[in-house]
Amino acid sequence: MARAKSPSRHALVDSALKLFWKRGYHRVSMDDLVRETGVSRGSLYSDFAGKEALFHACLDRYQETVVTPAFGGVEAKGAGLAEVGQYLDKLLARNAAHPGPDVGCLVLNTLAQVTPEETETLARLKAHGRRLQKGLYQALWQENQKHQKLDEAEIEALARFTLISLQGLWAQSRGSRDIEALRQYCETLLELLANRLGTDEVTT
Amino acid sequence: MARAKSPSRHALVDSALKLFWKRGYHRVSMDDLVRETGVSRGSLYSDFAGKEALFHACLDRYQETVVTPAFGGVEAKGAGLAEVGQYLDKLLARNAAHPGPDVGCLVLNTLAQVTPEETETLARLKAHGRRLQKGLYQALWQENQKHQKLDEAEIEALARFTLISLQGLWAQSRGSRDIEALRQYCETLLELLANRLGTDEVTT
DNA sequence: CTTGTTCTGGAATGATCATTCCAATAGCCT
DNA sequence: AGGCTATTGGAATGATCATTCCAGAACAAG
């Protein structure tokens, strides 16, 4: 054994994640990472194969520390439209929490700057999409049990619509300070979903 | 007068636009631009203050050559939901036209990598958002005349929802080859809008 | 304290980048 | 043809970047 690692591996990745999230992969230099994480260059390169590998670790950690806390409720057994509403509330709360433009969603930001060659990165982005799609499908399916207005194909389409539409929310939250517009969007989305499923009112 | 400019200024900007669109601002070098546009470095710097100025010219040209042809119908006087449907069809057609993942929307891609300091760039992105919002509002307002189910505030909210939701379509079209999913999304969106406005069927 | 291991800080490397500069060149007008 | 101007190709500059390397500091165990 040797000296205790100053920041734990998780703390290291968390710091890097914060940087990548705010500025994007290409605008974060290794010097920035050394400064921000408090870990020396040598250690960074002994812990990770390079900048890209570290970024992949950040993408993975993003799933654990950001997506799961916000979206886990929707994925839970028995979740319905109410849980989707809670998810939206969490997004709005996070947006209102800090001043200045929001950082949006790390996955979506990355999607806009990735090239088809970066297969490792792309695989993670696609997995994220599948995760959200699946969670939304289950929640909508559950909600549909109440009135049975839609068949499974229609639920699938509605889940896909919701997923794509939500990505717009992430994009919009970046660079816009207009919380009220975002809230309006969330309300409209929920109403539309409820309308489709026959649920008259969504209680969060 | 001197030698005719090899490619006209428009052709120059169009070439640069194509590059920026596909790869993003930070992944296009001046060497790439020299190679692709066929204009020498010296001329590039005498025509534009620098890389960023050239990019701004591309953003402006994008409005003329991409947004207007696709979205102009929605902005036209008397346009309603049918024109919104035509706009969506154009997007889908463009997506299906070329193989490989789509390039998405230049404005949205840029939004994901811009920093708050780049005010000139941000101003153009915001203007784009306002343009779409306004066009959508007018079309929805017009459509609403038929049944008068919504008041102006509700139309405003619905236009905003549509705008944000559409941004998700752009994001999704990048990196996904699943045309069918995109078409499903467009259909669902149109149905939802029609439902809200009381129009039973949208004829494109 | 000594030894062995891990971590550090910074220098060195080689690549790429935006931008500037300029001598050579290519077309235009008289 | 000769002169004028716009354009060219490429070299030079200075900055930044990812990555490698290493001599020594910090620490744990004996």
Image: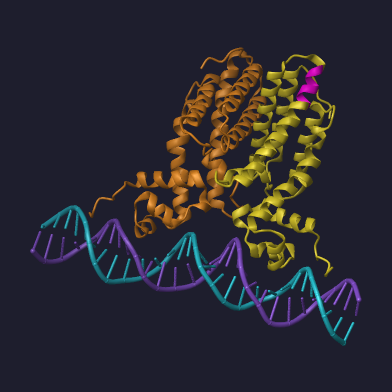
Chain colours: A yellow, B orange, C cyan, D purple
Residue B42 lies, in percent from the top left, at 35, 60
Rendered position, A150 above or below A128: above
Q: Quadrant of the C terminus of chain A?
A: top right
Q: Residue at x 68, y 29 (%)?
A: A162
Nearest the camera: B12 or A123? A123
Per the picture, the main secondary structure of the magenta-coloured stretch is helix
Rendered position, A131 above or below B144: below
Residue B51 lies, in percent from the top left, at 46, 55
Q: Residue at x 48, y 30 (%)?
A: B94
Would you say D12 lies left or right of B110 here? left
* Picture quadrant of residue A125: top right
Q: Is A144 a magenta residue?
A: yes
**In the rendered image, is residue B56 in sight?**
yes
Q: Quadrant of the N terminus of chain A?
A: bottom right
Instruction: State the count of labels.
Output: 0
Would you say A32 lies left or right of B22 here? right
* Picture quadrant of residue B46: bottom left
What is the span of residues highlighted in magenta in the rendered image?
A: A139-145
Nearest the camera: B29 or B83? B29
Q: Residue at x 31, y 47 (%)?
A: B7
Q: Is A91 a magenta residue?
A: no
Residue B178 lies, in percent from the top left, at 58, 30
Rendered position, A162 above or below A152: below
Rendered position, A70 above or below A48: above
Residue A14 lies, in percent from the top left, at 76, 54
